[in-house]
Amino acid sequence: MAERMDRSRWWASMMARSMGGRERKPRLENCLAECCGVDRRGLSDDALVQQSVRIKEQRTVDFAFTEYFEAKVLVKRPYLTKEMCLRVVAHPLKKEMQEDGERVRFWAEVAELDGRFLRVITLADEQTIHNAFPDRRFKP
């Protein structure tokens, strides 16, 4: 998500430079095409948004949780919920593969934790959540 935001900011700054400093707002269909793969093809704005929502709903991924996560992590950290972890994996500020190549780390800010950053670790498939904890050392 952060990568997409950086690209769109870069694109907006490039367009502003090419237009003599005037900032150009991206059109709705361009935003939805980049985000969801939606093609306008003569649709009204409302129909376009509805189509993008349908496409996003079709792209939902089923997540799983390891036995370790269920038995240890949630018991040890009762302030964490599965829903928080799913949000972090779905919309991370940063994502990186661990050195061993068997785990993937995701970070995102979580409002329920007073704006602290939550690190969620998944297996290599990025769909099986293995561990989660507030990361005090993470700097965005």
Image: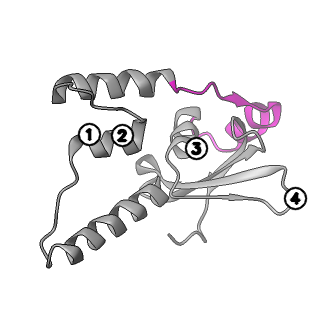
- Residue 63 in the image: state x and y as whole percent: 65, 29
Q: Nearer the viewer, residue 30 or 1?
A: 30
Point out the residue furthest to the right here: 100
Q: Residue at x 51, y 54 (%)?
A: 108
124 above or below 17?
above
Q: Is residue 26 left or right of residue 1?
A: left
Residue sitting at x 29%, y 72%: 14
**Quadrant position of residue 15:** bottom left
Q: Residues under labels 1 and 2: Cα distance?
A: 6 Å
Disc 3 or 4, which lies upstream in sequence? 3
Q: Position of residue 25 (x, y in %)?
A: 18, 57
Give the amino acid type for the residue marked by disc 3 in the picture. Val
Q: Earlier in the sequence, mark 3 or mark 2?
A: 2
The answer to whether the residue labelled 1 contacts the one labelled 2, judged by CB atoms less than 8 Å apart, is yes
Q: In front: mark 1 or mark 4?
A: 1
Q: Is residue 27 above or below residue 63?
A: below
> Badge 3 is on which residue?
89
Q: Residue 62 colored magenta?
A: yes
Kindly report the distance in space between the C-alpha atoms of the residues bearing marks 2 and 4. 35 Å
Which numbered dot is residue 100?
A: 4
Identity, as a three-letter code, of the amino acid under mark 4: Asp
Identify which amino acid the numbered label 2 is placed on. Answer: Ala
Task: Indicate left or right for 129 with 35 as reference.
Answer: right
Query: How far apart are the alpha carbons under marks 1 and 3?
Result: 26 Å
Disc count in the image?
A: 4
Mark 4 crowd level (few <14, some 14–19, many ≥20, 10 Å Cα): few
What segment is highlighted magenta in the picture?
59-81
**Residue at image mark 1:** 29
Disc on res. 33: 2
Q: Do labels 1 and 4 touch, CB within 8 Å?
A: no
